Every structure is written in structure tokens, then in C-alpha cells.
């Protein structure tokens, strides 16, 4: 499905070699048991009680792995939000750029170089051999909270041909990524926690570019004579979670009017060669994506990284989202990646590594954006923010939702926000790369 790219980063003055990242790993062994066929009509559900209690995966999830470092070194005391700020239930953190590899530990576990080129955030040693165990015990992190969050996050690399006028294709390095774990307050009672070792792929699917899968599900849900009583259904958004590209106004916020040409766009360049967006050079351009809200409750992953999760579909009369019967509601994972640029003549020529895969049709510049998440938080900390920020119930004790920003855990403490330095276990060369990227310099890594 993906073309093979061999990547050599030639910024030796700025970033340490990462060749050791591929040594000593045991390939992830994915056990996948499909739990649906054919599709079961969804209904307005009651969350985790749909299958009679806890998801089966909770009885076989990965064992908790205690952090092998002093967690307190990554904690600071912060103001605990005392109000829900308009009924929000969210936890926000951010991650800096870590590295690039043609690896995918979810879809191509144990196969270095088998994937299209990816940009990685979070765990500094994430690679094709990464498992929950290796992520929890090895590597630093470029995310808020440092090694408390050794999760791996990645998406197709953004590329530019002849970027420096020398005929070479270069990698456009991001400034940073902002990550939300969100819930609607009205839905908290329906949502179950993320299990340890959970991973998924979400966003544009090159194997299903027209979103036929979600269309088939909506059609099945709307079949006459199926006995449903809640009316008709439709896809939520475009059905794949990729919101599009958008301009920034300040510090990771979306632009809106009066800036012309700032509305979300599904790709970066029109067929006539013009840019779809008109972002000023003083503001970044970002890609926005959200994960599925439904989980089969059995599998922590699946061969394609997608089949164990689904996007909700909406009931037309109430606009409420529903999952298939027997599936479980989970938090929505939202990712926005921000890039500095030199104007529309610059970014309209960017394209994703997944836009040009040999085994799929060629997509428009920036059209095939998708993302992967392999969770490896210190689970004691993760449980704290899922309870205090998202309001989820743990051990029979209901939480209270808040808006927790800048890696606040909702208990009076927060993870150290890494504005530049990525982690304390490695040399700070990535700090230099990040600061140069913010200054509009050294924005590229060379491809051979």
C-alpha cells in the first residue's frame, strides 16, 4: 500500500543519529478478532453498558508498566481549573517534532522502511519495532510532561520538490503539534477509558478515498424495515475525521474571518495551480484531524489500524452521534499540526508522502492527511487527567470535567511544557532544530 522510502537526515550539526532506534525491538504481534459482520444498525446507546459492562479488552489489556524514571522531575504545580469553562471536558498537551522514518509500527510492525515517510512526535525512539512495552521503557519524549508521555504520534511527512533550488526533494519540518483528548460533557457517562496499549490510525484512508465505508454503514442503518425508531442517519462530517488545512491566528488557534481564504480546505493546491488558502506569512498553516469515537471493545489494534474503531454516525432528528450496538464510546483524539511557511507560493507546492504512493492513485497536494497514535502514557497520570479533565469514572468514582490546558492534570499538578527542549535523556540538538524552524530557517531535511 505504501512506497518504500529510505531516509537519511543530513542535519548532523543539529540532531543526533537515531540509527540505534531500530535495535533490540521485538515486533508487535497484533491479534485481531473482527467483532462485526455484517454491520449492526446503531441506536442511541448508553455507552459501556451496551455489551453488558466493561469492554472485554479491559480483562486482557497490557499490564501496567511503571515508569523507569523519577516522574516528579517532569511535574510542576499549576493552577487547578475550578470551573468547567462552559461545560468543557478536555485535556490538551503539545508535542514538538522528533524525527522522520519510513516506519509504521501499527500497519507494518517489525518492518523498517516498509511504510511511506512519516513525521514522528513524542517518543524519540519510536520506529517500526515499537511495542507498548518498548515505548513505555525506552526513549525520551518531545511532548508536554516529557517521559510521562512516551506515546508515539506520527503522520505522513510533508514534502517539497526543489525546495532549495538544487533539484532535491526536502522534508518540511513542523513547528509543533497540539493534541486534545476531548469529550462532550453530555456524553461523559457513555464514554469508557482508553485501555493500556491502545493504538489506531485515523483520517483520510488512501484505500477508501471516497469514504465508501462510512456511506455503506449509513445505508445499512437507514434500511427500511430494520425496526429502528430514531429516524434516519448521516455521516458525521466527511466521515474520515480529516478536517482539512487552515490558517492560524495565534499560538495554535484557528483563523477565521476577516482573513480571506482562511476556511478549512481539503487540500493545498487547486487544479488550476492556485493555492486553496491565503494564509499570511506571519501565521502558520495547520492540518486538523480527529479520531473515531467508537471502539469494538475487544482489539487494542487491527491489521490496518482502523477496523477496530469507527466514527460515529449522526441521527438526523436529534443530531446525536451513535455507535453500532455492542461498540463502546471513547474519547475523541484531536490533532492539529502547525507549519511555518513563506506564503502561498511556498505551501501550495507541499505534498504528503501518502499523496504519491505507487499502489494508489495520486492525490491532490495535502489531500491524504491521516495520523497514528500508539498510547504509552504513564497510566497512573493518564488516569488522573481522564478523571479530572474528561470527567470519566474510575473504580466506581465519577470524575468531574474541566478544561485542562498546557498539560494540566486537573489535580493541582501539570507536566512540564516543553517549549523547545524535547527531553532530558538525549542531547538538546532537537531544541536547535525547533528554534530554527520557528525562525523560518532550516525548515527542511534533505532526502537522498
Image (cartoon, rainbow, N blue to C red):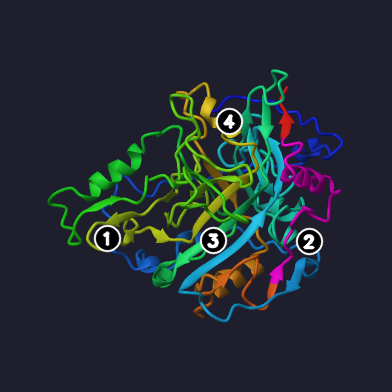
Task: Tell me which secondary structure the magenta stretch mostly adopts.
Answer: loop
Q: Disc 3, disc 1: CB below 8 Å?
A: no
Of label 4 and label 3, which has the lower sequence position?
3
Rounded to the nearest whole Å, what is the CA distance between mark 4 and mark 3?
34 Å
**439 part of magenta stretch:** yes
Look at mark 4 in the image and give the residue it sits on: 345
- Residue at point 74% right, 63% down? 67
Look at mark 2 in the image and give the residue it sits on: 68
Front one among 23 and 314: 314
Rounded to the nearest whole Å, what is the CA distance between mark 1 and mark 4?
47 Å
Q: Disc 4, disc 3: CB below 8 Å?
A: no
Mark number, residue 181:
3
Rounded to the nearest whole Å, what is the CA distance between mark 3 and mark 1?
24 Å
Instruction: Specify the quadrant of the image occupied by residue 19.
Output: top right
Q: Which residues are magenta?
A: 414-443
* Residue 304 x %, y %: 49, 39
Q: Nearer the observer, disc 3 or disc 2? A: 3
Q: Disc 1, disc 2: CB below 8 Å?
A: no
Of label 3 and label 2, which has the lower sequence position?
2
Q: Is residue 442 above or below residue 328?
A: above
Amino acid at each position: 500500500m505504501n512506497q518504500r522510502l529510505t531516509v537519511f537526515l543530513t542535519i548532523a550539526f543539529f540532531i543526533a543519529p537515531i540509527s540505534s532506534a531500530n535495535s533490540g525491538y521485538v515486533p508487535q504481534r497484533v491479534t485481531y478478532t473482527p467483532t462485526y459482520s455484517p454491520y449492526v444498525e446503531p441506536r442511541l446507546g448508553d455507552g459501556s453498558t451496551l455489551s453488558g459492562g466493561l469492554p472485554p479488552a479491559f480483562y486482557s489489556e497490557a499490564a501496567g508498566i511503571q515508569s523507569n524514571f523519577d516522574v516528579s522531575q517532569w511535574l510542576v504545580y499549576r493552577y487547578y481549573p475550578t470551573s468547567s469553562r462552559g461545560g468543557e471536558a478536555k485535556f490538551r498537551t503539545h508535542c514538538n517534532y522528533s524525527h522522520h522514518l519510513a516506519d509504521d509500527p501499527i500497519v507494518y510492525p517489525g518492518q523498517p522502511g516498509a511504510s511511506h515517510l512519516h513525521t514522528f512526535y513524542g517518543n524519540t525512539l519510536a520506529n517500526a519495532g515499537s511495542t507498548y512495552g518498548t515505548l513505555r521503557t525506552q526513549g525520551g519524549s518531545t511532548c508536554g510532561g516529557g517521559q510521562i508521555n512516551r506515546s508515539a504520534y506520527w503522520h505522513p511527512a510533508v514534502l517539497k520538490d526543489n525546495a532549495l533550488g538544487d533539484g532535491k526533494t526536502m522534508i518540511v519540518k513542523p513547528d509543533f503539534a497540539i493534541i486534545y483528548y476531548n469529550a462532550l460533557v453530555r456524553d461523559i457517562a457513555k464514554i469508557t477509558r482508553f485501555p493500556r496499549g491502545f493504538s489506531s490510525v485515523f483520517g483520510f484512508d488512501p484505500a477508501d478515498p471516497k469514504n465508501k465505508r462510512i456511506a455503506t454503514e449509513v445505508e445499512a442503518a437507514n434500511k427500511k424495515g430494520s425496526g429502528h425508531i430514531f429516524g434516519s442517519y448521516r455521516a458525521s462530517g466527511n466521515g474520515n475525521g480529516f478536517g482539512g488545512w487552515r490558517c492560524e491566528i495565534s499560538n495554535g488557534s484557528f483563523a477565521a474571518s476577516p482573513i480571506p481564504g482562511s476556511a478549512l480546505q481539503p487540500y493545498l493546491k487547486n487544479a488550476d495551480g492556485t493555492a486553496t488558502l491565503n494564509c499570511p506569512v506571519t501565521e502558520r498553516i495547520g492540518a486538523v484531524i480527529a479520531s473515531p469515537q467508537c471502539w469494538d471493545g475487544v482489539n487494542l489494534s487491527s491489521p490496518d489500524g482502523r477496523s477496530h474503531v469507527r466514527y460515529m454516525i449522526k441521527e438526523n432528528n436529534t443530531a446525536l452521534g451513535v455507535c453500532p450496538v455492542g461498540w463502546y464510546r471513547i474519547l475523541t483524539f484531536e490533532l492539529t499540526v502547525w507549519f511555518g511557511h513563506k506564503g502561498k507560493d511556498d505551501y501550495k507546492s507541499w505534498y504528503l508522502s501518502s499523496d504519491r504512493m505507487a499502489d494508489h492513485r495520486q492525490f491532490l497536494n495535502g489531500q491524504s492527511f491521516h495520523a497514528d497514535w500508539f498510547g504509552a502514557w504513564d497510566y497512573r497520570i493518564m488516569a488522573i487527567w481522564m478523571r479530572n479533565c474528561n470527567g470519566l469514572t474510575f473504580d466506581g468514582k465519577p470524575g468531574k470535567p474541566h478544561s485542562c490546558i498546557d498539560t494540566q492534570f486537573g489535580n493541582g499538578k501539570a507536566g512540564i511544557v516543553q517549549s523547545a527542549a524535547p527531553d532530558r535523556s538525549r542531547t538538546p540538538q532537537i531544541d536547535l532544530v525547533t528554534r530554527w524552524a520557528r525562525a523560518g530557517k532550516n525548515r527542511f531535511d534533505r532526502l537522498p
